[in-house]
Image (cartoon, grey):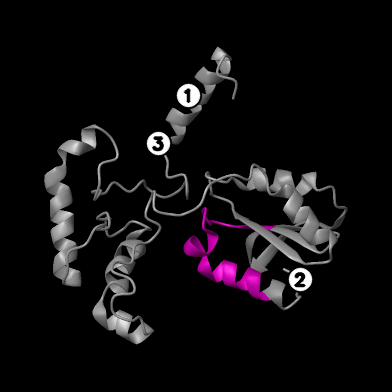
Amino acid sequence: MNPRNTLCAQSLGTFNNLLSEVMTAQILLDKCVYASPRPGTETDKSAGAGRKILSEEAVIVTGKRVKHPPPRVPLGCISYTAYLSYFWANDALTRDALGIKDGTVDEWVRCHDGDLPYAVDIGSSIKYHRNVTVNGYRALVYSGDHDAIVPHLGTQAWVRSLGFPVVDDWRAWHLDGQSAGFTIAYSNNMTFATVKGAGHTAPQYEPERCYAMFSRWVLHQPL
């Protein structure tokens, strides 16, 4: 966005304000409001007591002092399983069953913000997709149709930009006699599909439909 374009900046601000009212990962779900283990804004810094409680809860469950206690997530929230995974992965019985040697990993943390050792330095991956497909490799590109983080219309647009001829035009694909999404197939063995009802991480929201889609694809069966 050009910062000098006042009208564009105002429109983008309006859009972002409206978008903040929905859960962007799956727009039909309620936004989850939960206690954070670390401050995200200046206002949050006054909530130190709440973060201390989270740390104490983690100590009780794991039996040791931790650096990154997970945010407390409401029971009905889609990310509650991620909350539980912290305690599961840091449990001594779990580590023993997985063969993790003592001292190799002090604390398992799921995608802790700021700790991932990578830099975003690729503006577009379209050329890589083109290289893969023109060299004969099969490709399945799929999107949840209720994802507002990477909307399926945007994914569909870059797939079209590759310029491959359509060999099987838009149609529904089915599971148990019901539409499970829509699909289109291109030359160079590229298939694009939407998953009905799925969000940003599609298998998390619609595991049965995603399993059916992927199983058919790896078995060289039509969706």
Q: Name the residue under label 3.
A: 21
In the rendered image, residue 141, in percent from the top left (x then y), is placed at 68, 58
Residue 24 showing in the rendered view:
yes
The quadrant in which residue 172 appears is bottom right
Most foreground residue, 107 or 23: 107
Seen in the picture, residue 18 relative to 114 is either above or below; the reply is above
**Residue type at numbered disc 3:** Glu
Q: What residue type is labelled 1?
A: Gly
Disc 3/disc 1 C-alpha distance (Å): 13 Å
Name the outermost residue toward the front: 103
Query: In this orientation, which residue lies closer to the viewer: 211 or 59?
Result: 59
**Would you name the residue on which mark 2 appears?**
222
Q: What element carries label 1?
A: helix
Q: Name the kind of residue labelled 2 in the image.
A: Pro
Around disc 3, counting alpha carbons within 10 Å, would you say few (fewer than 14), some (14 to 19), or many (20 or more)? few
129 in relation to 90, above or below: above
Query: Marks 2 and 3, Cα distance to the nearest angstrom?
Result: 38 Å
Q: What number of labels is visible? A: 3
Circle 2 packing at 10 Å, graded few (<14), some (14-19), many (20+), is few
Q: Give the range drawn in magenta.
A: 193-215
Residue 205 is inside the magenta segment: yes
Residue 189: mark? none
The disc at residue 13 is 1
Of the numbered discs 2 and 3, the one sitting upstream in the chain is: 3
Q: What element carries label 2?
A: loop
Please tell me which residue is depicted at 29% across the width and 46% down the height of the picture.
33
Q: From what the image shows, is residue 180 above or below residue 36?
A: below
How far apart are the alpha carbons under marks 1 and 2? 43 Å
The quarter in which the C terminus is drawn is bottom right
| Lateral position of residue 23 relative to residue 179, left or right | left
Q: Say if the magenta span includes residue 194.
A: yes
